[in-house]
Image (cartoon, rainbow, N blue to C red):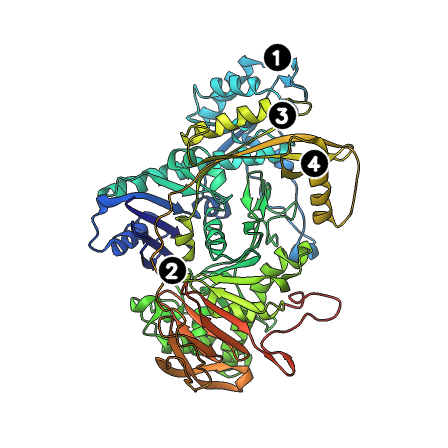
Amino acid sequence: MGYSVGVDVGGTFTDVVLRGPDGGIRVAKCLSTHDDPAEGIVAGVVAALGRTDPALVTGVVHATTLATNAVLERRGVRVAYVTTAGFRSAIPLGRYARVEEDRYDLRFDPPPPPVAAEDCFEVPGRISCSGEELEPLDEDAAARVGAEIARRGITSAAVCLLHSYADPSHERRLAGILRRTVPTVVVSSEVWPELREYERATTTIMSAYVGPVMEGYLRRLTARLAGIGITAPIRVMESGGGVMPVELAARRAVATIESGPAAGVLAAVASGHPDAISFDMGGTTAKACVIRNGRPEITHEFHVGGKGSFGGRRAGTGVPVKTPAIDLAEVGAGGGSVAWVDPAGALRVGPRSAGSAPGPACYGLGGEEPTVTDADLVLGYLDPASFAGGAMPLARELAEKAIDLRLAGPLGVSRAEAAHAVHEIANASMGSAVHVVTVQRGIDPRGFAMVAFGGAGPMHAARVAARFGISTVVVPAHCGVASAAGLLAGDLSADRVRSALDADPERVFSELAEAAAADLGVRLGAPGVRVDRSADVRFIGQAHDLTVPWTGSPGDLAERFSARYEQVYGIAQRGPVEVVGYRVRVTQAAPRPAVPAAGGGTAGRGTAGGGTAGRGAPAAARRAAYFTEAGGYVETPVFTRASLREAEGPAIVEDAESTIVVPPGWRAVLGEDTAVTLTAVRTAAGRAGVRAPRPGALAGEDA
């Protein structure tokens, strides 16, 4: 084993982690370069390598928001949609839900469809739901459609014919004809052959929309890395938590739409807490995910680009995509989120972000609007000299000026009050993401630990946890670049699915496993290759299904489905069931290097906090930080992770890539694995630092 590189490109920072053969880690953090993400990646890789020979790098794993941004910002390629005669209007009509402020807009205009009506085409021919040919494909009409698509200068086409999951022959023949004149043709039976033509169509369209963009980007990135001497294979994180070869990622770009957030969840899983809430706050967004029994929740359909959808489950918001994805909620609240006063005089935070250019005002890069990072700096949580490991000093005076002019003045409050309000509103916004993945889905979060990471996550985690009665917050080592580190824990994997009624399960599973193994270039039965099988099951007479692990026993399968049904819907239901689809994931385990002994330890544990060092290591420094429990600014001990043993809040723990804020009522303890665990301190009055849920509801609803 040589060196492995993990690269996570975020909205503000690009994080790079270099792991050596002995398990040792070096990290680099630099501003993202949105015009050319490869530029920031190369800069970060060079910094992480230092004097290490690039030829020793044996693998690069990349998490990217390229596909997501292409959808959200509508920067994909123009796509033509081709379907069965009589169904060309399905995509332009779409499905729309009026949410948030749109509910009250009497002149509401639905968002534009993913493909313009004039670019939707139809071809005669029909397959039945049982796979029988009812009408032959009109190949002359297909050729005319291909010629018209080419005449319009469209270079990418998405093909989705009715019931192609049952028999893909029409789609394949149609695609062959279109490829004579159209460079890129994506067919639904190859992308995701499932029931429900609308979702299958939108998934195919999104793959055709972002596929050429992804392919060009990965080709340029490969060349740029080769230019600095790295010729190792590049793999891309996919939405479900595995990694795929770069060639497969280019063909199935739709599977990378949730690439970046998935990597962070893997880092939370690696923390070793079986029941946890992953909390990732970066520069642009905050993300939350539930981990139960050591496994993150997986969904097989989500919506991208919708308003108010948070976890992507609200039908009618955004574009539905059917592909396995880690089930998380995401909100536009990060360190770069802009704070502003709306026309009614109310303070708002986000969802617009200052990003990396110009960035928060304190970056000194020309930004003039106050952000969450500016507020945290004014509150004393951030050290201007040690931000990003000291590589990027912050200008406190610029942050103060921005808050004074844009917030404190218009609101008629002090600078500290305005900054604290920004901090609290950001916490409330991020609490809504935790609320979506827990309370809204029937999960009591109070029995979970919160695993906090991201550049800004540990600064806000204790306050967010307190809203839900969560009394344990874990901040792992390298928390500021945890997503990049999580990439190196991902196994190589590929998914295949097929909707089929009254099929031979073993035959279908065998065919799907062979196809998934071919995607990865691995051999079934080889060491380290695992096959996981699951099925889509529903009660006979119902339209929708749930996915459960496969068992050959019909009785066991029915029991698993009934248990899952009760978990999801809260109803104990029994009755005859049927299998409507089959799923396979083929995984090749990633090599695991030796883990070096963790430094720091917990020897000589004592307490240090509130100004008293006690038996623990003394604070490295002190500075004024704002805590409402202490009445405002108070001299606060500041530790490094290496110097921390145990500290009572208020305290601050600084990392090279992140900062941990320990509020009053919390205790921070360094573990043997160098993770910092924050625990709410129990007092005679109850649980200090944790706000219990109000009667009749779980905390977070009043966020």
Disc marking residue 505? 3
393 above or below 100? below
Instruction: Look at discs 2 and 3 and give the one toward the viewer.
Output: 3
N-terminal-most mark, 2 or 3: 2
Disc marking residue 136? 1
N-terminal-most mark, 3 or 4: 3
N-terminal-most mark, 2 or 4: 2
Helix, strand or loop for disc 4: helix
Quadrant position of residue 196: top right
CB-based contact (under 8 Å), mark 1 and mark 3: no
* Residue bearing mark 4: 556
53 above or below 440? above
N-terminal-most mark, 2 or 1: 1
Residue at 58% x, 14% y: name it.
Answer: 138
Tell me the amino acid under the disc marked 3.
Pro
The CA span between labels 2 and 1 is 55 Å
677 above or below 31? below
